[in-house]
Amino acid sequence: MSRLIVVSNRMGDPRKPAKGGLAVALNGALNEIGGVWMGWSGTITDTAPGEGQLHVVEEGKITLAGLDLNQQEHDGYYLGYSNSVLWPAFHHRTDLIESDSEAQETYKRVNRTFATRLYGLLQPDDVIWVHDYHLIPLAMELRAMGVKNRIGFFLHIPMPPSQIFSAIPEADWLMRCFYHFDVLGFQTQDDAMNFRLYAERILGEDPCSGDQIKAYGRTVTSRAFPIGIDVDQFRDLLNHPDAVELSERLELNSLQRKWVTGVERLDYSKGLPERMKVFRRLLEKYPENMRRTTLVQIAPPTREAVDAYADIRNELESLSGAVNGEFARIDWTPIRYIHRHVSRAKLAALFSISKVGLVTPLRDGMNLVAKEYVAVQPDDDPGVLVLSRFAGAAEEMDAALLVNPFDIESTADTLQRALSMSLDERKERHEALKRVVEDGDVVTWCNGFLDCLRAQR
Ligand code: ADQ
């Protein structure tokens, strides 16, 4: 079978224990058939632009190729264009776009460097799988160098509707980049539909047939491949000593208390301030939760060098402080807000004893936390998933209580409904959700995408 070449912003490393399902799945696929994983090495050096060293290491059947970047490259490509233009735009926050032509040029140049360095490692029948918004122009760069291999792309974040996409500076160039791949994978049917509608409405192409979309004189296969988690690996975390110890301590505490849990990187797309307002409204409107219900919100720092992230941190600290100041009692704190990284074993334990998983992003590609929460619920007394309609996960996980996170009042009502749901209803919903999570795990996702890519031409 042809080798697999994975390219992502950060290189996975099979020498270290894989943290997330994505690394587990891709390592698994690479280990089975052999191939290359290329990405930024994580190191910033003071080399000239495009001259960063490529560190190539053989690890069993996998070749790891880590590219160093210099400061200006990292700032322009990663913090600048990827995270100050594409991330906000694709999450419907065009107001947060920080347009900067120099950053955009750097983004293009770093993609060219990735392509040039990858070229030296390629064999003619390799299958190339590119991940995420940092590397949208990579196929165009490779094609310009004459690469004929099959190249697929998976977008981990939402594909915005055509009107929003059009607001991105040089939107036409960016859209053209997508058409140099053979297969485009999206998280949801809605995302795939948004991609198609851009061709029809903005480019004026004829309605396309099936999942083949034609534009710019090229044809691309565009399809939804909802990502999943490694269910067994996540469940096994419950046996880790950290998880066992935390569960015991939390259970001691939960004799009269209910835990509601939220976990995500501190990102403005995740709806964190709205969630704290929901919790405040819950306490005001349903005072029986006083002293009995606690929100544990874990939100570790991310991309702090980008201004919008510092703003959201300040807002959250002030909101959690205000709610706690108003409602706390000497023996009870309503919101436990943790702005630090927490081990995955502890997260699994926290999810497993929480009565409600509160997953309310304003916009999210999929949201793996929703799936992780369901994976570790006890069958005989499961908790309830309250899930935003604007998380990709909502398309499949409609047995959750779906909410509009912008509507504080009705989300607070739904949270109360979750906290008081009968055991029978909880079990019924949980059975349906568990099936979605188990049937659509990360290996199914990985194989589904690769089968589709291999079937091209
Ligand atoms: P993210 O935006 O990072 O991913 P998500 O899908 O929720 O969002 O994945 C986060 C992962 O990090 C989860 O496995 C979670 O357990 C872990 N995590 C979160 N907070 C943590 C903490 N405090 N400590 C330790 N681990 C933590 C992007 C897209 C998503 C898409 C994924 C995968 O934005 O929409 O679902 O990629 O495609």
Image (tube, rainbow, N blue to C red):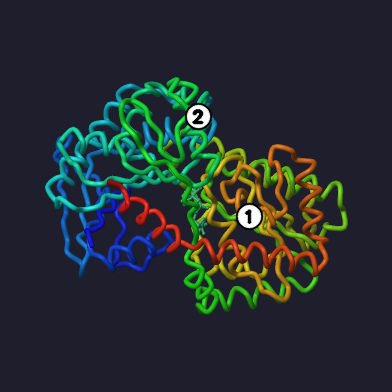
Give the camera-side residue of 130 and 184. Answer: 184
Asked whether the viewer can see residue 317, the reply is no
Residue under numbered circle 1:
397
User: x, y percentage for residue 10?
Assistant: 32, 50
Give the camera-side residue of 371 and 409. Answer: 371
For mark 2, does the 10 Å Cα neighbourhood hold few (<14), some (14 to 19), or many (20 or more) residues?
many
Residue under numbered circle 2:
197
For the point 16% across and 43% down, which residue is it? 52
For the point 17% across and 37% down, which residue is it? 50
For mark 1, does the 10 Å Cα neighbourhood hold few (<14), some (14 to 19), or many (20 or more) residues?
many
User: x, y percentage for residue 187?
Assistant: 49, 47
Asked whether the viewer can see residue 343, the reply is yes
Give the camera-side residue of 356 and 178. Answer: 178
Determine whether, in the image, residue 354 is placed left or right of residue 314: right
User: x, y percentage for residue 23?
Assistant: 37, 60
Q: How many marks?
A: 2
The quadrant in which residue 84 appears is: top left
The quadrant in which residue 86 appears is: top left
Q: Is residue 97 above or below residue 261?
A: above
Q: Residue furthest front?
A: 209
Determine whether, in the image, residue 170 is placed left or right of residue 322: left
Per the image, label 2 sits on a secondary structure element best described as helix
Whether the residue under disc 2 has CB within 8 Å of ligand 1: no
Per the image, label 1 sits on a secondary structure element best described as loop
Residue type pointed to by label 1: Met
Q: Quadrant of the N terminus?
A: bottom left
Residue type pointed to by label 2: Leu
